[in-house]
Image (cartoon, rainbow, N blue to C red):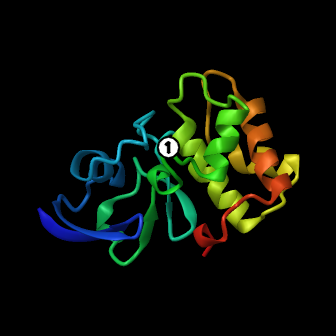
Amino acid sequence: MTQTTLTVNGEPHTLDLDEDMPLLYALRNHLGLNGAKYGCGLGQCGACTVIVDDKPVFACLTPCSGLAGKSIRTVESLGSAERPGPLQQAFIDEQAAQCGYCIAGMLMRAQTLLERNPHPSEEDIRAYMASNLCRCGTHLRIVKAIRHVAEQGAMPHENRR
C-alpha cells in the first residue's frame, strides 16, 4: 500500500492504495463515487470514462500511481439529480438513457468534446463518441443530446479549463 493523493472533482483525497490499483476502484470503493461503471475491464466499452487533465480516460485501465497532481473529474462533477448540468439535462430531455449503464461514461466523453470544440458537427460527435458503446442502442439520442447542447451554447464556462 502506498499513500496517494488524488484530486477528484476539485477535492484532494489522500488514500492508501496498491500502486497498480485502477482509478475506477479507488473512485468507487474508496471515495463512494459510483457514477463510473465497470463494463468490460479492457477499455473497450467506455462505461468507466472519467476526465483526467481534460482528457477522457478509461478508469478501468488507468493506475492510480500516475495520477498525483492531476485533476480528475467524474460524472458527479457535472450536476446532481436535483440540479442537472446542461449536458445531463439534454440527455434527460432526449431520453438518451435506456438502462443507463453507459451514460456516465458517455457524458464524460461528450463533456470533453464540447470543452474542446463547443460547436462540433454531427460527424465530429459520432467520431469522438465512437469508443463509448451503448448496448441499448440509444446512440442517435445521445448524438441528438450533444448536438442540442452545442447548438444552444449551453456549456457553463466554469467547467472549461
In this orientation, does residue 50 appear? yes
Frontmost residue, 77 versus 105: 77
Frontmost residue, 18 versus 72: 72
Residue 61 left/right relative to 53: left
In this orientation, does residue 131 appear? no
Quarter occupied by residue 138 = top right
Frontmost residue, 155 versus 115: 155
User: Of helix, strand and loop, which one carries label 1?
Assistant: loop
> Can you give x and y, in whole percent of width and height, for residue 31 in the image?
26, 53
Q: From the image, which quarter does the C terminus lie in?
A: bottom right
> Can you give x and y, in whole percent of width and height, for residue 151 in the image?
86, 53
| Residue at x-position 74% and y-position 58% | 154
Q: Amino acid at mark 1?
A: Glu
Q: Determine which residue is flagged by label 1.
A: 82
Residue at the far left in the pictured view: 1
| Residue at x-position 50% and y-position 39% | 47
Q: From the image, which quarter does the N terminus lie in?
A: bottom left
Q: Is residue 160 above or below residue 86?
A: below
| Residue at x-position 41% and y-position 39% | 41
> Can you give x and y, in whole percent of width and height, for residue 112 in the image?
64, 60
| Residue at x-position 80% and y-position 38% | 144
Frontmost residue, 12 versus 125: 12
Residue 71 left/right relative to 158: left
Q: Residues within 10 Å of mark 1 (few under 14, many from 20)?
A: few
| Total numbered labels | 1
